[in-house]
Amino acid sequence: MAKKPENLSFEESLCELEKIVADLEHGDVALDDALKQFERGIKLVRNSQHKLDNAQQKVTVLMTQEGVDTLKPYDSEGE
């Protein structure tokens, strides 16, 4: 039995999501199985987003304690 999304680390969730996407893109999955995988993927995404939100909140708290007012958004296009 697969672990519940909330019991997976962020990295484990990402790995499983990548596998689900690859399986669904390949197209050899029966409709019922595809729907189950899609549902699992949605749960993994939601849980991962929750973990990212919590991490951002912790960073914000730590930055505030250090006297830094705000974090600047990462600009990947500037590279």
Image: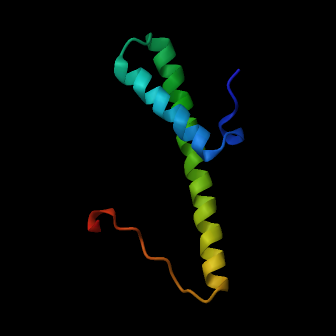
- Looking at the image, is 47 positioned above or below residue 38? below
Relative image position of residue 1 (x, y in whole percent): 71, 20
- Looking at the image, is 78 positioned above or below residue 69? above
Quadrant holding the C terminus: bottom left
Relative image position of residue 28 (x, y in whole percent): 39, 11
Residue drawn at 60 percent across, 38 percent down? 12
Q: Is residue 59 left or right of residue 7?
A: left
Q: Is residue 60 left or right of residue 75?
A: right
- Number of numbered discs present? 0
Residue drawn at 44 percent across, 10 percent down? 30
Relative image position of residue 64 (x, y in whole percent): 62, 83
Looking at the image, the residue that sits furthest to the front is 79
Of 16 and 79, nearer the camera is 79
Say how the picture is coloured. rainbow
- Looking at the image, is 65 positioned above or below residue 45? below
Residue drawn at 58 percent across, 43 percent down? 11
Relative image position of residue 51 (x, y in whole percent): 62, 53
Q: Quadrant of residue 9?
A: top right
Q: Is residue 49 left or right of residue 29?
A: right
Residue drawn at 51 percent across, 15 percent down? 33
